[in-house]
Amino acid sequence: QVQLVESGGGLVQAGGSLRLSCAASGRTFSSYVMGWFRQAPGKEREFVAAISWSGGSTYYEDSVKGRFTISRDNAKNTVYLQMNSLKLEDTAVYYCAADFRGSVYYRAAYEYDYWGQGTQVTVSS
């Protein structure tokens, strides 16, 4: 069982930056692929990025490549999403998710086993 708690969301102007954090409970954090998803109003939840258990492999949705960076600190049971050059279309609730011994290439929400409650990111013009 893993419990996930996101933080770091907020209001930022277009072009600005935010860093999201996701703190996980449980001693097997390093066994999980960790992912970030987002959901904008009226839209389906979409994949943003994922990172392997070791942090050695990462995978990004095309629209965030070069702007977002996913990382993890297994000693702190925490995964991060650094978001730079934010755009209006990045506005969404961002969710952290854990997939037990999965793959960084899994983009579907149903592949993930545990979810956080979400944190709101709002990008203004």
Image (spheres, grey):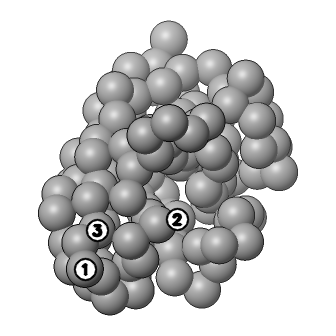
Quick one: which residue is furthest to the top in this view? 1
* Residue on which the image places disc 2: 70
Amino acid at dot 2: Ile
Amino acid at dot 1: Ser
- Is 108 positioned to the left or the right of 15 in the image? right
The numbered dot on residue 49 is: none
Q: Is residue 92 above or below residue 5?
A: below
Q: Is residue 17 visible?
A: yes
* Residue on which the image places disc 3: 123
Residue depicted at x 63% and y 45% = 46
Amino acid at dot 3: Val
Q: CA distance from mark 1 to mark 2?
A: 25 Å
Residue depicted at x 25% and y 80% = 125
* Residue on which the image places disc 1: 125
Q: Nearer the viewer, residue 97 or 122?
A: 122
Q: Nearer the viewer, residue 3 or 82?
A: 82
